[in-house]
Amino acid sequence: MAENYPHIQKVAVFGSVHKQGFAKASTELLKCLEKHQVSILLDVRMEQFLRSNHAYLPAAYQVVQKGDSFAVDLALSLGGDGTFLKTAKRVGSAGIPILGINLGNLGFLVDVKGDEISAAIDEIMAEGFNVEERSLLEVKAPDVLPDGDTIALNEVAVLKQDTSSMIKVHTSLNGQYLCTYRADGLLISTPTGSTAYALSVGASIVMPQSSSFVVSPVAPHSLNLRPVIVPDHWQIDLDVESRNNHFLIAVDGRSVVCKSGLHLVLKKADYSVKVAKRNGHTYFQTLREKLMWGADARLDV
């Protein structure tokens, strides 16, 4: 159930400085935050970009360096879904709600459009915001994944490295052998990730409140293989074979090259991400808007 957060006194701002219109959007955001007299923390890359481009900076702020721990009432992510994922990584297990502001295209995780920044900030300062808890997926691959790159909000993908032959992924669920996927790859997705990579390979959309993960093959050799939904308290074991002796592990898009024969263990992480939503904004509304459900293309003819 969503929980309302009514009082905002301190915020941290993260952003994708390469997005078109970033300086203009950040100016509007920072001026609005100043108007509401909240304390502002700026990500170091964002601060450096704004300073070097002579863009607007608040009269008073603190800089958040990479790796710094911080405590705020709300983290603002200025960009798209990719920026939101990076912000979630920075927040980690701190339990800070994250509000996404969209400067990209589709954006399932971002709740505020780029042309409504001031109105949205005014609204949440006056009325607070709701929070949706989103489960995370943790992958254990000893001596392979860097620290901090083992947690996924969307998915963990096991993929072939190049255009060579497919890989084999021997898959067990909760200690019981399921099957061997012969495919270009295999996705293990959270409910949040069901509208990301998994959506493009034909998996079902899963509600954020569902306690489940989705196992989806990418371009499987056998057409009768279909996505499988499993309880998120189960352990997922993967053993990967590759003809060229290498494959990729991608954790929310952050990929590393691994050697064939690696054993992977995937489990639900012991903490979650808090996604901030404006009052009255629902997941179903997001689906209707982003996927254009109910839209009739004949009306534009």
Image: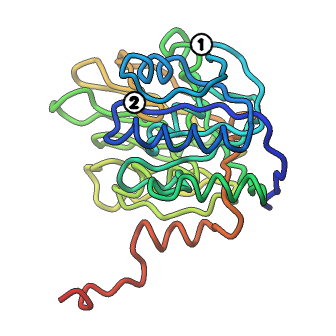
User: Observer-nearest residue: 3 or 93?
Assistant: 3
User: Observer-nearest residue: 239 or 186?
Assistant: 186
- Tell me what residue is drawn at x 53 percent, y 17 percent: 44
Q: Is residue 105 left or right of residue 148?
A: left
Which label sits on residue 17? Answer: 2
Q: Position of residue 100 (x, y in %)?
A: 56, 47
Q: Amino acid at mark 1?
A: Gln
Reading the image, the residue beneath label 1 is 65
Task: Give the secondary structure at mark 1.
Answer: loop
User: Observer-nearest residue: 20 or 142?
Assistant: 20
Which label sits on residue 47? Answer: none
User: Observer-nearest residue: 60 or 289?
Assistant: 60
Q: Is residue 184 above or below residue 161?
A: below
Characterize the local packing of mark 1: few (<14), some (14-19) or many (20 or more) Cα atoms within 10 angstroms: few
Q: Position of residue 163 (x, y in %)?
A: 15, 32
Snapshot quadrant of residue 55: top left
- Tell me what residue is drawn at x 18 percent, y 33 percent: 165
Where's the C terminus, which quadrant? bottom left
Q: Amino acid at mark 2?
A: Val
